[in-house]
Image: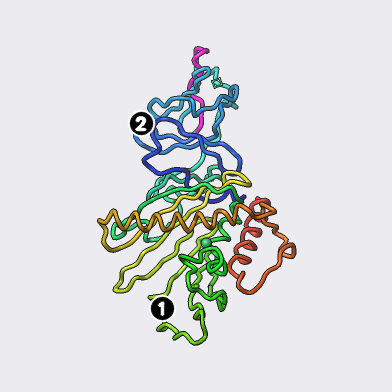
Amino acid sequence: MIRGAWYAVTQRENLTTKPMKVTIHGQDYVLYRDEKGMVCAGDAYCPHRGCDLSLGTVEGAELICPFHGWRFDRDGRCTRVPANRGVWDVPKNAARATYEACEKAEWVWLYTAPKRVDMDASTEPDLFPELCSDNWTRTPFRATWHAHFVRVVESVLDVSHLPFVHPQTTGAGVNPEVDGPEYALTSNRILIHPKPFAPVHPMEPVEAVETEDERTEIELRAPNLWIIRTPMGDGNAMCTFLTFTPCDTQTTEIFGAVARNFDMDSPLLDEFHLSHTRFVMGQDQAIIESIRPVAPPYDLHREAHVRSDGPTVHYRAMMRTWLEEESLR
Ligand code: FES
Ligand SMILES: [Fe+2]
């Protein structure tokens, strides 16, 4: 699993001064807001006797262990051992590892590699403009899939499944011949233009050719930020954003939002877009959770691939390279 990445852990309003435990890559972290509202993150267990610090309390900027009352500042240093009189009694190894965390768009994000001394204070997840602009209205949601992170991400890069998994919705009337798909790679990004699909029947009239700006577009910012943009004409557009958090090797948390830049104040449209998205994702979930082996083989020869798998094969190769590079650090 990739450690050097930002992972969404909760919606912003859910994080308070009550410590919250989350699991990423099978490792437990505790996050909380200090009394100034700053987000703090660190290892979940106390360096003294391993008590779960999510059972603790926050006072000022300090997290207090519920077992013997040791206090830790936001950098993980133990500032006080109540059973002993002086600060000189704090053992050198009485410190917790801490991590970068921030708030952006609707979520709290955690960077799961240890704090980097060279990390620019402004470093944060590289989110899409639709998530950071007041010209878009967004309705967030979350889902839990019992599937491997890479399998889940690959499912949203795969356009050839649409007529089979979503015959009533996104795949309705779609010919299985995806004719490509057309896609482009730039460093850690994959851009897919899933159209044009061939007409279902050869005698059906071909729809008017879409211009560059009218095409549906899928963008992935690896490893885990994904968006699909659907133009609606006259500059109006809808999009669905998803980000994926690997809890462990067989559980992936999905945080998402449906968004649009028109009819901003329409709860009915919010609800319609959200229920459509949940329905489509439910169909995907049943398929992706059925995949064996659960973890995708990084040796590409162990699965069969065809041309329409281009984006998913590139993603898997990208993840393999990333993992190899992390293991060398
Ligand atoms: S276990 Fe945390 S203070 Fe003892
Ligand atoms: Fe799907």
- Residue 188 seen by the camera: no
What is the C-alpha distance between the residues marked 1 and 2?
49 Å
Mark 1 crowdedness (10 Å alpha carbons): few <14, some 14-19, many ≥20: few
Q: Is mark 1 within 8 Å of ligand 2?
A: no
Kindly indicate the quadrant of the structure image that contains residue 231: bottom left
Give the label on residue 212, or none. Answer: 1
Name the amino acid, label 1: Glu
Quadrant of ligand 1: it is: top right
The prevailing secondary structure element of the residues shown in magenta is: loop
Residue at image x 41%, y 78%?
A: 212
Q: Bounds of the magenta span?
A: 76-86
Q: Nearer the viewer, residue 234 or 168?
A: 168
Give the label on residue 35, or none. Answer: 2
User: Along the horizontal axis of the image, is 32 left or right of 89?
Assistant: left
Kindly indicate the quadrant of the structure image that contains residue 276: bottom left
Q: Of label 1 and label 2, which has the lower sequence position?
A: 2
Q: Position of residue 239 (x, y in %)?
A: 39, 62
Q: Nearer the viewer, residue 117 or 189?
A: 189
In the rendered view, tell whether residue 301 sits above or below residue 179: above
- Residue 221 seen by the camera: yes
User: Along the horizontal axis of the image, is 299 left or right of 5?
Assistant: right
Considering the numbered disc 2 on the image, is that residue within a helix, a strand or a loop? loop
Q: Which is in the foreground here, disc 1 or disc 2?
A: 1
Name the amino acid, label 2: Glu
In the rendered view, tell whether residue 214 sits above or below residue 38: below
Give the label on residue 108, or none. Answer: none
Q: Position of residue 38 (x, y in %)?
A: 38, 38
- How many numbered badges does the structure rendering display? 2
